Amino acid sequence: MSKTPPFPLFIMNMKKHHLLLFFFLLLSIACSTDKKYGACELKETDETLSFPIDSDTKNNFNIYSVYKDKDGKEYLTFQNFENNTIHFYDLKQQKPAFRIPPPQEGSNGVGRTFGYYIQNLDSIYLFSFYEKEFHLINKECTLLDKQSYPEQKSTCFMATASHPPVRLGRTLYTCIEPNRLIEHDPVSFTIDMDTKEGKALHSFDYPDYPGSEVKLKRYGMEANYSRCYDGQRFIYSFHYDENIYVATPEHDSIRKIPVKSKYFDKVQLPDELTASPEDFCVNAWYNDLLYDPYREVYYRIAYPPSTLDKGVRSMELLQFGRKNFSIIILDKEFRILGETLFPDNTYNPKIMLVRPEGLYISDSHYLNPRFSDDILSFRKFELVEK
């Protein structure tokens, strides 16, 4: 028959036991939160999201974001560019919640807007489509403030899903359309949310790459870049540059990192004098860059060389994300983990939602047999190791 150890020795053994359990608990937590992946791919699932939209709103917009209110409720928000209206949908129930329709004229008029940033429902920043200015409104569309930056030589602010504004402390980081005709053409702009002082970050200009000397003003290619923020760094992806650019918030340190698709060798910006809309449907180029904080990876969209099917209008196809695309998956050190090629005429990579349960990609492609112009729908993809 075993004897119980002396009381002090029993206590010491219990402490060792608890320390051991505590150690294994920490180890299990560390392992469960380690989101490092090996070779991986995006795998289609049967799970979907579906949002009914009104007849005045197209389902190929590029101005959208997810907003979480003070109570933790999440909304899918998007802007109808034609009439300024910002739609709010209950993300969980997939139903319309409310809308904010800023007027273009009158005492609360904000003109034509293109993009927004929702600090909260009492502070909504609207960026002008034509001018270098923003308007500050609340949920009731009352005009609270207006600020212009006529001294800036850039064209306009951009606040789309490709260029989401980022707030760090009391500074709002926005993107601007660079002016390629001047010597320095920065792509980032900061606004002090207290003083409204604005400043272009000249430490990072539109980069040089093969073909970048072509201005292509006719097609507005200067605005075709994407920027995301991973909590520490801004990362830029330019459509005709195989490199991405990693910047500190101050943009005083820039790293250039090659991130090439395996489906084509190079990209080349078409010549301004001979380019046609068809070129942008069939030539290889890169598109948006997104950060996934739940899996700590990045997604870079790439368009491989393609063909234009008979009867398909090039400008319409471009609005829905071309015929096909791939997504390059990068880890936290920007190493390529894999690249997934998607089927033709099925998904629109210009509308994607990064959620805790996976990556949702819009399947509201107008050439998809299941397409409905009254529905904005998504399919969930999971990041899985090969």
Image: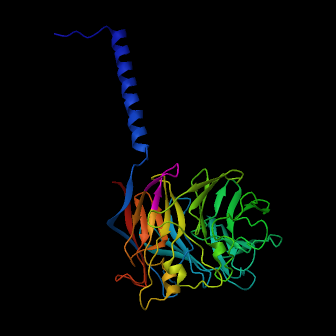
| 128 to the left or right of 81 | right
Which residue is depicted at the point 59% across and 80% down?
A: 85
Quarter-of-image position of residue 132: bottom right
Front residue of 77/308: it is 308
Frontmost residue, 381 versus 143:
381
Q: Is residue 330 magenta?
A: yes
- Residue stretch in magenta: 328-337
Q: Looking at this view, name the residue that lies furthest to the right.
A: 151
Q: Residue at x 65, y 58 (%)?
A: 167
Which image quadrant for residue 113? bottom right
The answer, for residue 66, to whether it is visible in the render is no
The image's colouring method is rainbow
Quadrant containing the N terminus in the rendered view: top left
Query: Is residue 254 visible in the rendered structure shown here?
Result: yes
Residue 219 location in percent, x, y? Answer: 63, 81
Which residue is most to the bottom?
311
Instruction: From this view, report whether residue 272 is shown above or below residue 386.
Output: below
Q: Nearer the viewer, residue 348 or 22?
A: 348
Q: Is residue 55 magenta?
A: no
Residue 186 position, x and y percent, is 73, 64
Question: Does 328 sit above or below residue 22?
Answer: below
Give coordinates of residue 16: x percent, y percent: 37, 19
The residue furthest left is 1
Tag count in the figure? 0
**Where residue 333 sits: x, y (%)?**
52, 48
Quadrant (top left/top right/bottom left/bottom right) for the C terminus? bottom left
Q: As rendered, which of 212 and 42 lies closer to the eye?
A: 212
Quadrant assignment, res 367:
bottom left
